[in-house]
Image (cartoon, rainbow, N blue to C red):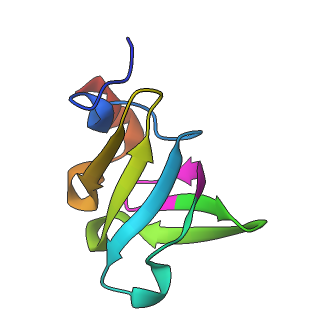
Amino acid sequence: MKITPKNLIYHELIGLPAKVVESTDPSLVGIEGNVTDETRNMVTIEHGGKEKKVAKANASFVFALPDAKVKVNGRLLVSQPENRIRG
């Protein structure tokens, strides 16, 4: 199934370009790169040759799709990836 802005939260995030646009931790805002890992509560983004872990519930992300950029409240992503993907 093709990833669209409407179904993004139900898909695998690893490999997608992402940017942290809001966070309760101001030092994380602006981090961008590809998602390299995901757990129930965290997204790992490769940024400047280093990996940064960002708590999903405390941040909003913009994911770049081929046809659009999609802003997602991280709270919508809090779940084990395999459970979220099943919908």
Task: Locate residue 33: give its quadrant.
Answer: bottom right
Q: In screen coordinates, is 47 left or right of 77?
A: right
Task: Locate residue 52: give its quadrant.
Answer: bottom right
| Range covered by the magenta-colored residues | 33-43
- Residue at horizontal 28 percent and vertical 51 percent from the top: 71
Q: In screen coordinates, is 13 left or right of 10?
A: right
Picture layout, residue 84 above or below residue 54: above
Q: Is residue 42 magenta?
A: yes
- Residue at horizontal 46 percent and vertical 70 percent from the top: 54
- Residue at horizontal 39 percent and vertical 34 percent from the top: 82
Query: Which residue, as the protein is rendered here, is positioned at the far right?
Result: 49
Picture layout, residue 70 above or below residue 58: above
- Residue at horizontal 47 percent and vertical 79 percent from the top: 28
List x then y, in percent, for residue 56. Answer: 34, 63
Query: Which residue, as the protein is rendered here, is positioned at the far bottom?
Result: 26
State whether the magenta stretch is mostly helix, strand or loop.
Answer: strand
Q: Which one is nearer the viewer's eye here, 76 or 69?
A: 69
List x then y, in percent, for residue 86. Answer: 29, 25
Picture layout, residue 65 above or below residue 70: above
